[in-house]
Amino acid sequence: MEKPNLHGEFICRLDAKGRVKIPTILLRQLGGTGPHSFFVNRGFEKCLMIYPEKVWEQNLERIKKLNVYRVEERNFIRYFFRGVSNLTTDSADRVLISKSLLGYIGAEREVILFAYLDRIELWDKKSYDAVLSEEPADFAELAERVLGSSEIT
């Protein structure tokens, strides 16, 4: 299966029930017609990770190979699955995020959907702005360390 190539940064609003509308342009990147199915779990840096269903299934195949008799791997599995839930777009292309997951990221009214590669991060807008408010002074050095020795040109 070919992985989607998602991209974009979208400012969205949560409704009173905790639903967020997935932008049409993002749904087009996923292909096909709705409803679209996703899985969401706790991400890093206080965001949520939203995976298209097929990407989630690929991640599960990797996780199934972990050794549950090793403490580190068992702990990873617990944290990875903590709060996980299935999301399906409704007729208005909205998904319902659980109150516990919204509480984890401190989501208020405005959220950011940040799509890259095969996943979507969901952030509280204030937190997202705080984390990315200043580009690192050494971004060129960081790029060299991360990408400099790879085959990317």
Image (cartoon, helix red, strand yellow):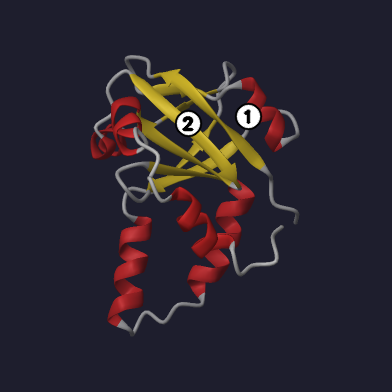
Q: Position of residue 3 (x, y in %)?
A: 69, 51
**Residue on which disc 2 sits:** 113
The residue lying at 64 percent from left, 21 percent from top is: 24
Q: Position of residue 1 (x, y in %)?
A: 75, 56
**Can you say which quadrant of the picture contains the C terminus?**
bottom right
Q: Give the image quarter of residue 17.
A: top left
Q: Amino acid at mark 1?
A: Leu
- Label 2, residues with CA under 10 Å away: few <14, some 14-19, many ≥20: many
Q: Is 99 left or right of 81, judged from the image as shown?
A: left
The residue lying at 32 percent from left, 14 percent from top is: 16
Q: Is 28 left or right of 126, judged from the image as shown?
A: right
Could you say whether the residue bearing mark 2 is in a helix, strand or loop? strand
Q: Amino acid at mark 2?
A: Leu
Q: Which tag, 2 or 1, sits closer to the chain's start?
A: 1
Mark 2 in CB contact with mark 1 (< 8 angstroms): yes
**Residue on which disc 1 sits:** 26
Residue closest to the eye, 68 or 118: 118
Q: Taking the image as drawn, is residue 34 in sight?
A: no
Q: Give the image quarter of residue 19.
A: top left
